[in-house]
């Protein structure tokens, strides 16, 4: 676990692909549990330790995760994420270059909880939610392209299904159309950075998460 930022109210880490943020039916140790243990040991706290989670990342995704260490911070962060007051940038590696190098995408997404998958529609349909993001191609290698995504809404698998909808599934993402998996089971999507006004101190916080230690990711970060 790599801590990127910590103060009395929040802690921000760089999640590895494969780690789960919150406990699920697998029973695997979650980052919430790990954070509680970290705080308990570092600060010699007795009893139960508070940790709040204002947002999530899918298990095969890496990058920035923000946790709240106090209920006050959690309440305000929840509101900030809900109201779009936190600037979230993602990096995605795709094989096929988008038809337009820079664009805003708006779709209507329907989540199928049984399949744990979201489906994209061009127009509003029953049970759909509006999903908007902006993307920009920022680098290219011989076989792959690096796309930066600004997430404007927070829908289930939003980046994954919206990029797939324009013919650019994320590398390794079999669920949304990639032709082969990544060796470690990850998908090549990384929560690169967050920028927001601190919920308590009101200072500007800007945090960038280094990319995974994998040759393709490293080559793009150094480009």
Image (tube, rainbow, N blue to C red):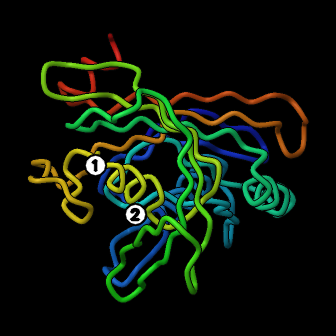
For image coordinates 55% across by 48% down, the residue present is: 65
Residue underneath mark 2:
20
Q: Quadrant of residue 154?
A: bottom right
**Helix, strand or loop under label 2:** loop
For image coordinates 40% across by 40% down, the residue present is: 190
**Helix, strand or loop under label 1:** loop
Please tell me whether residue 116 is drawn above or below residue 178 in the rendered image.
below
Q: Quadrant of residue 104?
A: top right
Which residue is more in the foreground, 112 or 127? 127
Tag 1 and tag 2, C-beta contact below 8 Å:
no
In percent of width and height, residue 109 lies at 51, 70
Which residue is more in the foreground, 140 or 91? 140
In percent of width and height, residue 3 lies at 53, 37
Q: CA gap, disc 1 to disc 2?
A: 28 Å
Q: Quadrant of the N terminus?
A: top left
Please tell me whether residue 219 is drawn above or below residue 34 in the rendered image.
above
């Amino acid at each position: 676990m790599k801590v990127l930022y910590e103060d009395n109210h929040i802690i921000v880490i760089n999640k590895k692909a494969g780690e789960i943020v919150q406990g699920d039916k697998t029973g695997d140790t979650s980052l919430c549990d790990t954070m509680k243990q970290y705080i308990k040991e570092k600060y010699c706290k007795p009893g139960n330790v508070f940790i709040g989670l204002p947002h999530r990342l899918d298990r095969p995704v890496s990058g920035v995760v923000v946790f709240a260490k106090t209920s006050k911070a959690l309440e305000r962060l929840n509101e900030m994420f809900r109201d779009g007051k936190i600037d979230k940038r993602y990096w995605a590696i795709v094989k096929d270059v988008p038809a337009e190098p820079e664009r805003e995408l708006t779709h209507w997404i329907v989540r199928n909880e049984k399949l744990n998958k979201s489906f994209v529609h061009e127009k509003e349909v029953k049970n759909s939610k509006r999903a908007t993001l902006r993307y920009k191609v920022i680098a290219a290698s011989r076989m792959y392209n690096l796309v930066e995504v600004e997430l404007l809404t927070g829908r289930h698998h939003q980046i994954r299904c919206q990029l797939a909808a324009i013919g650019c599934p994320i590398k390794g993402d079999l669920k949304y159309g990639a032709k082969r998996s990544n060796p470690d089971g990850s998908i090549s999507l990384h929560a690169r950075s967050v920028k927001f006004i601190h919920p308590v101190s009101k200072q500007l916080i800007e945090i960038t998460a280094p990319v995974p230690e994998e040759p393709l990711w490293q080559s793009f970060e150094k480009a």
